[in-house]
Image: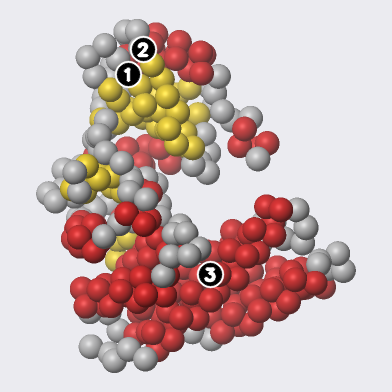
């Protein structure tokens, strides 16, 4: 946590910088409403309007320039609600100390809680998501490349084997890692390859917290840093898994899971192989997060282990669902 905390700008200093260099007018309030793994987001209230300031501390100049170009392209797409970049002093981005930032239009809305998302929400989300794949990107270098799934699988499997050999790993973690290793081997036996005719543009971090609604209307899709090539099935399954994971423990998750799966299966004519590839590539991303902190018995890591066990349970349910699916 310390590595992230040291990047947090001083509120007074940031306010002073934005007033003098960017807006050239007093800031009535500056509120940090979201902090991601690579950026900070601020709601800035000026005299006559509100704007969003996104400060990317992890990305270098080229990465933010790429993000600006992507947002400018997407914000002109019909039926794809994206917050536009606002220019200032004939510029689209600024440098603040060692970070780069952009100013975005403020779109009023909220991300519904997992238990508040209905099938009507899902239908609107899927409609908007389909339009992501219709984007015409003239320069493919702007997009994140597809993952080398085989390399990722082999790297995590090697890390898993190293952790299993550690004598300090507690009993629960040892058997959990053995289970993870078994899953990784199974994933490695599944073709994880992006074929040229199946290569699609995906959001890359598609979940309900990156969607804004107002009066049950989808008004904005957020966080486009990971827009790139991959299987849409991975994006869609990420959306469902994240939705299920954020529901209370007593919520009927199995029923909800299969309701969502049935709906998206009807909406997208993917083969069972494409669904399973998307499932396995998403599973690899989950393992990526797991292997950063394992082997300690503090509360946060025990909680992480429980979350991974829960994910493996859902993974097996979804894998069984798609294996029994008839190909279109």
Quarter of the image that includes the C terminus: bottom left
- In space, the residues marked 1 and 3 are separated at their CA atoms by 40 Å
- In space, the residues marked 1 and 2 are separated at their CA atoms by 6 Å
Q: Position of residue 191 (x, y in %)?
A: 46, 83
Q: Position of residue 26 (x, y in %)?
A: 35, 7
Tell me: residue 29, above or below residue 230. above
Q: Residue at x 70, y 78 (%)?
A: 178
Residue carrying label 2: 27
Earlier-in-chain disc, 1 versus 2 = 2
Tell me: residue 269, above or below residue 287. below
Say which of marks 3 and 2 sits in front: 3
**Depth order, front residue of 217/279:** 217
Q: Residue at x 30, y 61 (%)?
A: 201
Residue carrying label 3: 311
Circle number at residue 45: 1
Whether residues under marks 1 and 2 lie with C-beta atoms below 8 angstroms apart, the answer is yes
**Depth order, front residue of 257/140:** 257
Image quarter of residue 233: bottom left
> Within 10 Å of the Cα at label 1, are there few (<14), some (14-19), or many (20+) other Cα atoms?
some
Earlier-in-chain disc, 3 versus 2 = 2
Q: Position of residue 268 (x, y in %)?
A: 23, 74
Disc 3 secondary structure class: helix
- In space, the residues marked 3 and 2 are separated at their CA atoms by 44 Å
Q: Residue furthest left?
A: 78
Whether residues under marks 1 and 3 lie with C-beta atoms below 8 angstroms apart, the answer is no
């Amino acid at each position: 946590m310390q590595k992230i905390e040291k990047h947090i700008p001083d509120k007074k200093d940031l306010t002073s910088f934005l007033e003098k260099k960017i807006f050239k007018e007093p800031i009535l309030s500056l509120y940090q409403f979201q902090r991601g793994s690579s950026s900070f987001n601020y709601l800035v209230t000026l005299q006559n309007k509100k704007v969003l300031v996104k400060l990317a501390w992890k990305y270098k100049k080229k990465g933010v320039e790429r993000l600006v170009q992507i947002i400018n392209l997407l914000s002109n797409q019909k039926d794809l609600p994206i917050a536009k970049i606002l220019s200032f002093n004939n510029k689209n981005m600024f440098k603040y100390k060692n970070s780069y930032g952009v100013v975005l239009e403020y779109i009023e809305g909220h991300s519904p809680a997992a238990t508040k998302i209905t099938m009507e929400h899902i239908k609107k989300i899927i409609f908007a998501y389909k339009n992501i794949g219709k984007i015409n990107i003239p320069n493919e270098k702007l997009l994140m490349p597809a993952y080398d799934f085989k390399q990722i699988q082999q790297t995590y499997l090697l890390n898993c084997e190293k952790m299993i050999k550690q004598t300090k790993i507690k009993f629960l973690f040892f058997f959990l890692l053995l289970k993870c290793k078994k899953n990784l081997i199974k994933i490695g036996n599944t073709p994880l390859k992006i074929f040229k005719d199946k290569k699609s543009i995906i959001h890359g971090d598609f979940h309900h917290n990156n969607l804004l609604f107002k009066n049950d209307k989808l008004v904005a899709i957020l966080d486009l840093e990971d827009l790139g090539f991959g299987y849409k099935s991975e994006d869609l399954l990420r959306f469902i898994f994240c939705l299920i994971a954020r529901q209370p423990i007593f919520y009927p998750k199995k029923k909800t899971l299969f309701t969502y799966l049935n709906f998206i299966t009807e909406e997208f004519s993917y083969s069972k192989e494409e669904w399973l590839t998307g499932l396995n590539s998403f599973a690899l991303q989950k393992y990526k997060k797991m292997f950063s902190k394992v082997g300690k018995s503090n509360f946060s890591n025990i909680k992480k282990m429980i979350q991974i066990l829960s994910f493996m349970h859902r993974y097996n349910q979804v894998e069984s669902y798609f294996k029994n699916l008839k190909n279109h």
